[in-house]
Image (spheres, rainbow, N blue to C red):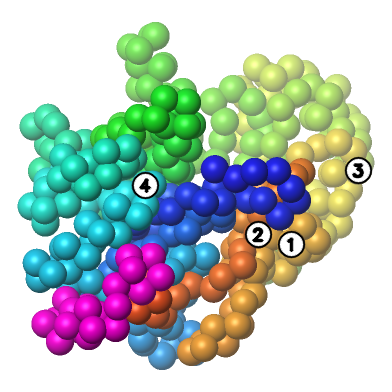
Amino acid sequence: MSGDGRDALPLAGVRVADFTWVWAGPVSTLQLALLGADVIKVESSLRLDTTRRLPPWAEDVPGANHAGYFNQYSQQKRSISLNLKQPEAVQAAKDLVAACDVVADNFSAGVMDRAGLGYEALRRVKPDVIVVSFSGYGATGPKANYIAYGPVQVPMIGLASLSGYPGLGPSEIGLSYGDPNAGLHAAFAVLTALWHRQETGEGQFIDMSQWEAAIGVVSEAFMDHAMNGRQPARQGNRDQRQAPQGVFPAAEEDEWVAVACWSDEQWHGLCAASGRAELARDPRFATAAARKQHEDELEAAITEWTRGRSWSETVETLQRHGVPSYHVLSNRGVAEDEQLNARGVFSELEHPEVGARRHIGAPWRFGTSDVRVRRRAPLLGEHTDEVLRDVLGYDAAHIAALRACGALE
């Protein structure tokens, strides 16, 4: 891995053969790319990555290189086209693995084996290779061959049973938590495996279940069952013990403020901020247990105050009094937020087909490494010849022959 110096990235010198697609896999390899690894995405025009086929597209014009979803999670990567239905392409993939440190895939269990690219085949090519395969349910067990997508995993980890309002049924949360969660777990596992290889010289196969990784998202509820044998009740935006916890309307139409009081001190701060000091002395709200018992009346009093002023006035006043609060941001609000922009959260690199578009960049700041987005997302197969020539050592005649037999489609 990298040496010293301000420009030395943590994973400089590490190369990744990236067979992942959709969301979970690309999230994982994006983290490795941001840390400095040379991530080479293997894809094919004959079976486009799902995210190349999904909106939003730039200017609402569909196209494999126009998809904002793909361009977000493929920043910092290179793209090589290989039609793995062709034996010549499979051999090229093995040659690529021989030049890599890490191989990543998030296909269903057995897919890579059937393609001739399973761990046993790859370790014969490179004995110390690190392979991370994060299928939906792991490589073993009765559900190993089930197809998995993030929305299915939300109810499978019990999250849907917790989401919703009292008296109503389970609620879909509108986000595939299992995907990015699995991606981050897999990236961490790879970092650990790289450290292990650095210490021992040994590669390894990491068999990760996206389902198992996601269970930690609901650890409190799971432990309530384990410790007490009960199912937590659905409670909307409220907390199980503390109040007030929720979102409250501002004077502007469809503008809201999130408020979370975790202590008596913060509750007293809210009372002072709202000019309702008498609420702090009200027996109904004097303790956390009392506030929870009288939560409807408590929220009504807060709503009466927030409705009478702008969200910005409410947030600034509450923050000044030490109360955790913030504006409920729209997507535009996130993109324009002064804190995020001051931190340099976003990247805007010129793209040959869609121009400079705003993307989310690296979420960390390193004291001794300049970790940031340096390369836009690749066009489909943009680096095929470059990788075949410079990484695999193929000459022009070999590359031409691969193209002629359809191995590079």
The nearer-to-camera label among 1 and 3 is: 1
Q: Earlier in the sequence, mark 3 or mark 4?
A: 4
Q: Earlier in the sequence, mark 3 or mark 2?
A: 3
Q: Earlier in the sequence, mark 4 or mark 1?
A: 4
Is residue 278 shown above or below 153? above
Question: Of the residues shown, which amino acid type is indicated by label 4?
Answer: Val
Q: Which residue corresponds to the image point at 42% horizontal and 39% vertical from the top-left?
A: 190
Image position, residue 361 (x, y; %): 61, 61
The nearer-to-camera label among 3 and 4 is: 4
Assign the C terminus to one quadrant of the image.
bottom left
Question: Of the residues shown, which amino acid type is indicated by label 2?
Answer: Arg
Q: Which residue is mark 4?
A: 102
Question: Of the residues shown, which amino acid type is indicated by label 3?
Answer: Arg
Q: Which residue is mark 2?
A: 372
Q: Which residue corresponds to the image point at 43% horizontal and 59% vertical from the top-left?
A: 39
Is residue 248 shown above or below 168? below
Q: Which residue is mark 1?
A: 344
Q: Which stretch appears magenta?
A: 388-409
Element at label 3: helix
- In front of the other: 250 or 294: 250
The nearer-to-camera label among 1 and 2 is: 2
Question: Of the residues shown, which amino acid type is indicated by label 1?
Answer: Gly
Assign the N terminus to one quadrant of the image.
top right
Q: Earlier in the sequence, mark 1 or mark 2?
A: 1
Q: Earlier in the sequence, mark 4 or mark 2?
A: 4
**Disc 4: CA contacts within 10 A as few (<14), some (14-19) or many (>=20):** many
| Pointers 1 and 2 in contact (C-beta within 8 Å) | yes
The nearer-to-camera label among 4 and 2 is: 4
Is residue 267 shown above or below 56? above
Q: Which residue is mark 3?
A: 320
Instruction: State how far apart marks 4 and 1 are (Cα).
Output: 29 Å
Instruction: State how far apart marks 3 and 2 are (Cα).
Output: 33 Å
